[in-house]
Image (cartoon, grey):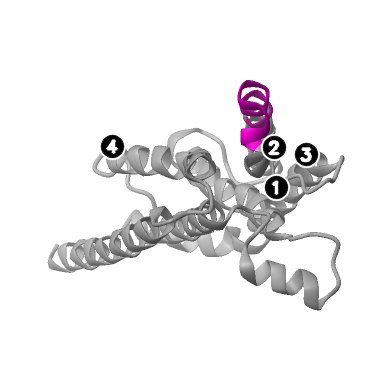
Amino acid sequence: MIKHEKNNQEVNYLHIMMLFIFSAIFIWSLISPKDLFTWFLEALPVIIGLIVILATYNSFRLTNLVYVFILVHAIILLIGAHYTYAEMPFFNWLRDYLNLSRNYYDRLGHFAQGFVPAMISREILLRKSSLKRGKLLFFLIICICLAISASYELIEWVVAEATGSAADAFLGTQGDVWDTQWDMFFALLGAICSLLGLSRLHDSFLYRAML
């Protein structure tokens, strides 16, 4: 009992530290972004995610592994919101140094769009459904991640239709007619890499969470 309470206290300290890091990055991202409207569009999923996490924190607490990846994903989104995905400075440097055709920061963002939701979906399905580890679970998680990616692309399309050129930075196609397909492919790749590379580690965190 004492050990369990100590573990909970350590978890709470970790979560407070993560919330502090998130708050610092969020404030930095909001200070003088390249375009405030684009910032709002890119940061909105982060804001919605934070509300959901806070609302469900006491009733359905995720493992620390998943919370860490959610934080990393939020940071990727907030950096993209601050600079826009087509103008992230480090990836501009990579583009110029490697003589690439575009800034590839948005590809990283869409890779994370599959990688992190795969872990979230896996945890929810294993804890809240009768699904067992195996091929069916793998397949359903991939489907969920692709559905999220496709939904995001549809949202981008609706916003672009509604706001016109004001959403150009939000779309971030950089002249690539296949940008939507590449975005979904990288989300798929992220989900597959997440499940293949982290499932065993995730299981260990799930096991410890149930002790």
Provide the residue designation for mark 1.
187
Alpha carbon distance from label 4 to label 3: 32 Å
Per the rendered image, the range of residues in magenta is: 156-167
Q: Earlier in the sequence, mark 3 or mark 2?
A: 2
Which dot, 3 or 2, sits closer to the camera?
3
Magenta region, main secondary structure: helix
Q: Could you say whether the residue bearing mark 3 is in a helix, strand or loop?
A: helix
Q: Pick the quarter of the image with the N terminus.
A: bottom left
Alpha carbon distance from label 4 to label 2: 26 Å
Q: Residue at x 52, y 51 (%)?
A: 81
Provide the residue designation for mark 3.
180
Dot label at residue 175:
none
Residue situated in front as seen by the camera: 26 or 5: 26
Residue situated in front as seen by the camera: 210 or 103: 103
Residue 56 position, x and y percent, is 30, 38
Callout 4: 10 Å neighbours few (<14), some, many (20+)?
few
CB contact under 8 Å: marks 2 and 1: yes
Residue 196 position, x and y percent, is 69, 58
Provide the residue designation for mark 4.
55
